[in-house]
């Protein structure tokens, strides 16, 4: 199924209660200092429903209105500002190019919005979006309330748009899947490029530069999240982003880096030896993680509960750690008491889409939800053995391994979106040495 933005709005309109208005705000601009801003990225919900990328804008959908059903508030055209900051679409432009039935200046929103909301019983908005629109909605509703004696009817219910919109975003349309595959392909090229260029003595940020170069060169203008490039003990720090240490001969480097392409994320981790050859201990740990990755992924099919993949990864990792003596005792007891979590402390993965940790619930009515065709997720088991761990033989210390790929659930199983990133020990060694 491929939908355009207006079809998505229609589908959403069918899912809300009668007599509702839907409000979605653009992402806020974040100031860095004085007139310098952090690079702007549109809010995913806003983009998903409009395709419109400019800041300081807001969309209003009124499903029960015949006229002015889809309204965009946006910045005014302004030749001077456009000379300094770039093109603005303006009100005429959003009607023409973005299918708005009407458009107003964002500067007059406080005057106009109360009139447009009057008569709606319910207002839906995203309660999870950090844009402060909830306070604005309260003040618009308050303005309507002031006129009740003249017959104005204020909305009665403020409702969360999140569960409805997030469920839509969770199941990817075919055009979204195409974009995710393009993001995955660019990320694949970046990982191969980095593996081919790693050398002892290089700094983590220099390896990171290989990713950024490959992303940008291919039109993916930013990573989907801050890249993690950790050598040696840094590979054991889950959200390590300093990326400023030297890569040492004999160490592994763990790189968790994925690009965003046209609003869609990829999220891939590879762990490889800086000198091109896994040591026997690194090989042992890598093999356990690889087996966990493989067996978890085999649980990915429609109807299987989300948690099965995680449970499988725990079983394989616990059995592996028992076999090399890093855990001792009974497998079932270790699993039940969570004693493996000092080595494997995160879950098997997460939904992936417009955001790296994408929207969509993992449980329904208190139980793990079954997988469905069109869901996209990561599979990312790992084992991390910090230098500072007590009761661990020194030979294992400073080894952190994660293997992460992106998969889509199909009608009968799964498809790997990142099949060509070197994964086995042989493939990885060949690529680094080659
Ligand atoms: N890169 C973030 C994650 O793997 O979840
Ligand atoms: Mn990742
Ligand atoms: Mn991930």
Image (spheres, rainbow, N blue to C red):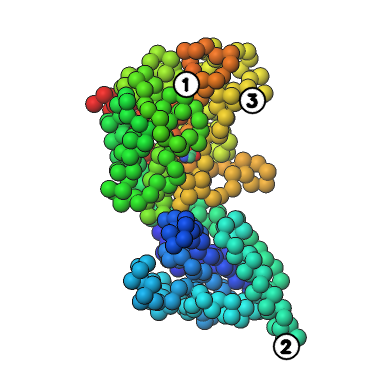
Give x and y (percent) for residue 378: 47, 39
Q: Could you say where residue 70 lies in the image, as x and y percent from the top left?
A: 50, 74
Q: In the rendered structure, are the residues bearing label 2 and label 1 in contact, judged by CB atoms less than 8 Å apart?
A: no
Residue reaching furthest to the left: 434
The x and y percentages for residue 60 are 54, 71
Q: Is residue 2 left or right of residue 162?
A: left
Q: Nearer the viewer, residue 384 or 164?
A: 384
- Tell me the distance, in whole angstroms, between the alpha carbons under discs 2 and 1: 72 Å
Q: Earlier in the sequence, mark 2 or mark 3?
A: 2
Residue at image x 60%, y 71%?
21
Q: Secondary structure at mark 2?
A: helix
- Per the model, the C-alpha gap separating discs 2 and 3 is 63 Å
Q: Which residue is mark 3?
A: 338
338 relative position to 284: left or right: right
Query: Quick check: 92 above or below 298?
Result: below
Q: Tell me the crowding category of disc 1: few under 14, some 14 to 19, or many 20 or more residues within 10 angstroms, Cα based.
A: many
* Quarter of the figure with residue 120: bottom right
> Mark 3 or mark 1: which is in front?
1
**Closer to the N terminus: mark 3 or mark 1?**
3
Residue identifier under label 2:
150
Q: CA distance from mark 3 to mark 1?
A: 22 Å
Q: Do the residues under discs 2 and 3 have CB atoms within 8 angstroms?
A: no
Task: Tell me the residue that label 1 is attached to.
Answer: 398
Q: Earlier in the sequence, mark 2 or mark 1?
A: 2
Crowding at label 2, few (<14), some or many (≥20) Cα neighbours within 10 Å? Answer: few
Closer to the camera in the image, 112 or 394: 394
Residue 53 in the image, given as x and y percentages of width and height: 42, 64
- How many numbered circles does the render carry? 3
Q: Residue at x 55, y 54 (%)?
A: 167
């Amino acid at each position: 199924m491929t939908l355009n933005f207006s079809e998505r709005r229609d589908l959403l309109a069918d899912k809300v209660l009668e007599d509702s208005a839907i409000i979605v705000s653009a992402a806020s601009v974040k100031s860095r200092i004085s007139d310098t801003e952090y690079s702007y990225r549109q809010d995913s919900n806003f983009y998903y429903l409009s395709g419109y990328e400019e800041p300081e804008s807001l969309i209003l959908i009124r499903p029960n209105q015949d006229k002015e059903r889809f309204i965009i508030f946006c910045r005014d055209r302004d030749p001077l500002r456009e000379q300094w900051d770039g093109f603005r679409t303006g009100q005429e432009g959003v009607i023409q190019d973005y299918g708005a039935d009407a458009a107003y200046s964002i500067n007059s929103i406080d005057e106009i919005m109360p009139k447009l909301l009057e008569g709606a019983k319910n207002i839906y908005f995203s309660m999870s979006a950090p844009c402060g629109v909830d306070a604005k909605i309260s003040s618009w509703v308050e303005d309507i309330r002031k006129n009740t004696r003249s017959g104005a009817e204020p909305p009665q219910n403020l409702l969360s748009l999140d569960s409805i919109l997030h469920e839509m975003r969770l199941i990817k349309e075919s055009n979204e899947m195409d974009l995710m595959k393009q993001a995955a392909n660019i990320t694949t090229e970046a990982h191969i490029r980095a593996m081919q260029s790693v050398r002892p003595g290089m700094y983590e940020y220099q390896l990171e530069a290989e990713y950024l170069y490959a992303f940008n060169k291919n039109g993916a203008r930013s990573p989907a999240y801050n890249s993690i490039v950790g050598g040696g003990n840094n590979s054991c720090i889950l959200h390590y982003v300093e990326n400023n240490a030297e890569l040492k001969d004999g160490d592994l480097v763990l790189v968790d880096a994925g690009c965003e392409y046209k609003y869609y994320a990829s999220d891939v981790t590879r762990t490889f030896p800086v000198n091109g050859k896994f040591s026997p201990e690194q090989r042992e740990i890598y093999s356990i993680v690889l087996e966990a990755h493989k067996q978890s992924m085999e649980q990915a099919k429609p109807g299987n509960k989300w948690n099965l993949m995680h449970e499988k990864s725990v079983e394989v990792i616990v059995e592996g750690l028992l076999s090399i003596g890093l855990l001792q005792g009974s497998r079932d007891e270790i699993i039940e008491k969570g004693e493996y979590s000092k080595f494997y402390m995160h879950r098997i993965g997460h939904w992936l889409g417009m955001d790296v940790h994408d929207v969509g619930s993992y449980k329904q009515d208190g139980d793990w939800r079954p997988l469905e065709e069109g869901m996209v997720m990561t599979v990312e088991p790992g084992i991390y053995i910090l230098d500072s761990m007590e009761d661990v033989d020194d030979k294992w210390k400073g080894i952190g391994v994660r293997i992460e790929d992106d998969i889509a659930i199909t009608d009968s199983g799964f498809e790997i979106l990142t099949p060509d990133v070197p994964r086995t020990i042989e493939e990885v060694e060949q690529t680094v040495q080659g």
